[in-house]
Image (tube, rainbow, N blue to C red):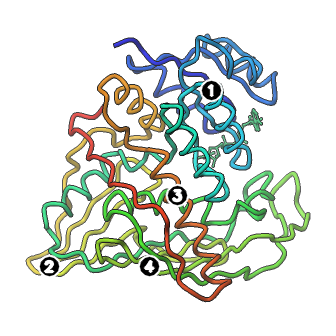
Amino acid sequence: MDPLNIGFVGVGNISGIYFDILGNHPSVKVVGCADLDMDRAKDVANKRGIEAMATDALLSSPNIDLVLNLTVPKVHAPINLQALEAGKHVYCEKPLALTSPEARKQVELAQQKGLRLGCAPDTFLGAGIQTARAVLDEGAIGEIIDAHAFMLCRGHESWHPSPEFYYEQGGGPMFDMGPYYVTALVSMLGPVKRIAGSSKISYPTRTITSEPKKGKTIEVETDTHLSGVLDFTSGTTATLTTSFDVIGYNYPPIVILGSEGTLVVPDPNGFGGTVTLIRRSGTEEVPLRFRHDQNSRGLGVIDIAQALAEGRPHRASGELALHVVEVMEAFEKSSREAKHVWTTTQPDRPDAMPTAGL
Ligand SMILES: NC(=O)c1ccc[n+]([C@@H]2O[C@H](COP(=O)([O-])OP(=O)(O)OC[C@H]3O[C@@H](n4cnc5c(N)ncnc54)[C@H](O)[C@@H]3O)[C@@H](O)[C@H]2O)c1
């Protein structure tokens, strides 16, 4: 199989791990990069031995098959649409868009053009969540009744050098961290049918205590404590809380509760971790059964390259990411309107990973 040629758009913090993973896999070849900050693009290109290009040039280059969009969330949708219009496959960092209409537009355009659209997170392709899913599918905890998931912290203004974006529209704990949790839950339990949420801004202003903006006040524009109940199409329920407002506690990130046992699932923001099975007979740690137990961001791109060659669907798909955006935005909408919000999409569970990995 010829490698799929990849062009990066946005080469900030997260791009390093993508270069490391994609630079070492025969299914893909990284050929170029672009960034609003051309100096940054040039530095990265020199370091990685690839070509620095202007974004428009990269999008129209005949040498690029897939655009890897690692820019900031508010420009994900416009850049993805531009890349699809230019006839490129796309893989984007999370979230796919800030609203479900913007996400849907991308899914529809990719379908019309016969192009692949993929989106992070791909952590659910890692050994931790894949092992948890296999244990559930084997019936180890019996009938799945409920799940609990928590992402709790007191916000990022105490350490992040520029934390303002966390409190702008499209920020908040749900759009920042929710994709990991909702994607992992959907990959294990199937699609969500409806959501009842309750959400709020506990602190209307925040004071930055990190350098260099120490003392600056941030006006909070988005809900920072969101709790809700998800009803899955399968009949299972789950509660999910994401918060920038509380100190929290060392809760397991995801716990799945069944008629015959309980499964403690590792952090969905990682690839490995510990899977613990609790039954009447006792508690056991389940050995991980799959490859990719270390940071492997970029697996979703490799999966697209192999799926194209094999003529099969890819796992971290645009359809899945659209569903995740619908679920996440439903928390605030349900809270505001004081009623359940129903999803309009029902993606299939992505196929399980091969145990030998990609
Ligand atoms: N940093 C992390 O730990 C992390 C982890 C997982 C996912 N992510 C996700 O990855 C994405 C990028 O995060 P990051 O931390 O690397 O951010 P960053 O700010 O470090 O990098 C983003 C880069 O995109 C460039 N950019 C912005 N707008 C652009 C445009 N219109 N055209 C071209 N380039 C543009 C910026 O100049 C910058 O170099 C976000 O969606 C984030 O949610 C980040």
Closer to viewer: mark 2 or mark 1: 1
Q: Which residue is mark 1?
A: 8
Left or right, 295 with reference to 95: left
Q: Residue furthest left?
A: 281
Q: Residue furthest bottom?
A: 338
Mark 2 closeness class: few <14, some 14–19, many ≥20 residues within 10 Å: some
Quarter residue 315 falls in = top left
Mark 4 Cβ inside 8 Å of ligand 1: no
Q: Give the distance between the C-alpha atoms of the residues marked 4 and 1, in whole angstroms.
A: 36 Å
**In the image, farthest residue toward the right:** 216
Characterize the local packing of mark 4: few (<14), some (14-19) or many (20 or more) Cα atoms within 10 angstroms.
Answer: some
Q: Which residue is mark 2?
A: 260
Callout 3: few (<14), some (14-19), or many (20+) C-alpha neighbours within 10 Å? many
Q: Amino acid at mark 1?
A: Phe
- Circle 3 residue: 179
Mark closer to the chain start, 3 or 2? 3
SS at circle 2: loop
Mark 2 vs mark 4: which is more N-terminal?
A: 4
Viewer-proximal residue among 296 and 102: 102
- Residue type pointed to by label 2: Glu
Q: Position of residue 344 (x, y in %)?
A: 49, 65
Find numbered disc 3 in the image and state the secondary structure of the residue it sits on. Answer: helix
Label 2 and label 4: CA atoms lie apart by: 20 Å
Numbered disc 4: secondary structure? strand
Q: Kindly report the distance in space between the C-alpha atoms of the residues bearing marks 3 and 2.
A: 29 Å
Task: Give the residue type at disc 4.
Answer: Thr
- The amino acid at mark 3 is Pro
Indicate which disc, 4 or 3, sits on the residue closer to the N terminus.
3
**In the displayed structure, would residue 52 be above or below residue 89?**
above
